[in-house]
Image (cartoon, rainbow, N blue to C red):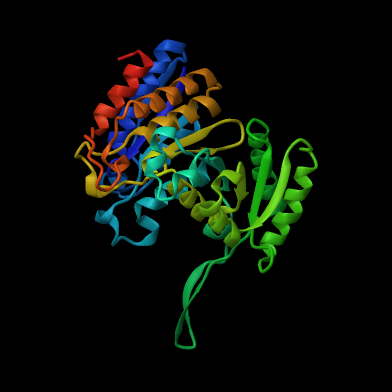
Amino acid sequence: MNRIVVLPGDGIGPEVTTQARRVLEAVDQRHGLELGFEEELIGGVSIDAHGTPLRDEVVALCRESKAVMLGAVGGPKWDDMSVDLRPEKGLLGIRKALGLFANLRPAQVFPALIGASALRPEVVEGTDMLVVRELTGGIYFGEPKHISREEGKRRAVNSMVYDEEEIARISRVAFESARIRRKHVTHVHKANVLEVSQLWMEVVDEVAKDYADVELAHQLVDSCAMLLVKEPRRFDVIVTGNLFGDILSDEAAMITGSLGMLPSASLAEGGMGLYEPVHGSAPDIAGQDLANPLAAILSVAMLLEHSLDAAEAAGEIRDAAAAVLADGHRTGDLVLEGEARETIGCRAMGDLVLEKLGTR
């Protein structure tokens, strides 16, 4: 049996994860994937129940699983807690504990949603990129880090740290991904001022020698941010460190029109992965059946592809989601301001995807 651990988390996490699980169970019946599910707590709900955002027992269960489905973590209820106990620590902790070093965030413009982007249709049409972000190193984890008082002033320190092995393995993920896409990798850096980026440049160039069929370009992070909104179609695969990847992947996401459409995969060596929508917990609409489940559903497609080697089933899910949108169905986040269009809820969107799959 292929065990899938489900971590619904906080806010709209349980709502969207429920729909994603329904879709995964449906394709399991069609393709005989032999899936088994276990549900656990993470984030704020885990703090409320156990006093910690991530228990050791949950980590152990995830390590023994084939993949992890995550909803979202965080919310204003826990904003006043100490940094070490906030819900987000659960997410960072599980990434580190499972060795999830590679974050893959596709940003594709669905033809039916081209008008939802803040950019002109002729700018975003045809955009289809993949941001490959290093996830367990860099400034979020580097030591030393502290806040101190020196000579009567408060002083804060964070350290951006990478070694050549960390850079090489994330670079290989990017080049392998490019090989099955359009065969182009853009490495994003700040080598004009950062020694860490200078090492990235050297190592990425070294790895590129093993991928003669893939074109490599280096791009400063500030100019990349500009080009993402000016010429998004030029990018195929972007590879970068934790901090730059965090920022650029959200920028790329908004090009598509809604964070509610963006899936992600965080992968360890060997195929184990954690799959989650990019949109966050959205506590203002939680429990109201207003959330868009498509990012979570598309995250399930990535789970099938990367952790279960079920590309055909993954393609069926993506085709079903695209067909629902092409029929004109929208959750509230996908409707333009001033547009007169009826909207549907989270459950109804899940129902429609299942109908397109022919399994409802």
Residue 275 drawn at (x, y percent)? 45, 35
Asked whether residue 89 is in view, the answer is yes
Residue 360 position (above or below residue 217): above
Count the numbered circles shown. Answer: 0
Asked whether residue 310 is in view, the answer is no
Residue 308 position (above or below residue 209): above
Image point (54%, 47%), residue name: 232
Give the left or right position of residue 19, taking residue 303 as reference.
Answer: left
Residue at the extreme left: 288
Nearer to the camera, 44 or 360: 360
Residue 291 drawn at (x, y percent)? 28, 39
Q: Could you say which quadrant of the image residue 173 lies in?
A: top right
Give the left or right position of residue 172, taking residue 85 as reference.
Answer: right
Residue at the extreme front: 122
Quarter occupied by the C terminus: top left
Give the left or right position of residue 166, taking residue 54 as reference.
Answer: right
Image point (36%, 56%), residue name: 85
Image point (36%, 41%), residue name: 260
Image point (44%, 23%), residue name: 319
Nearer to the camera, 136 or 97: 136
Residue at the extreme bottom: 151
Residue 5 drawn at (x, y percent)? 41, 30
Nearer to the camera, 114 or 152: 114
Residue 346 drawn at (x, y percent)? 26, 33
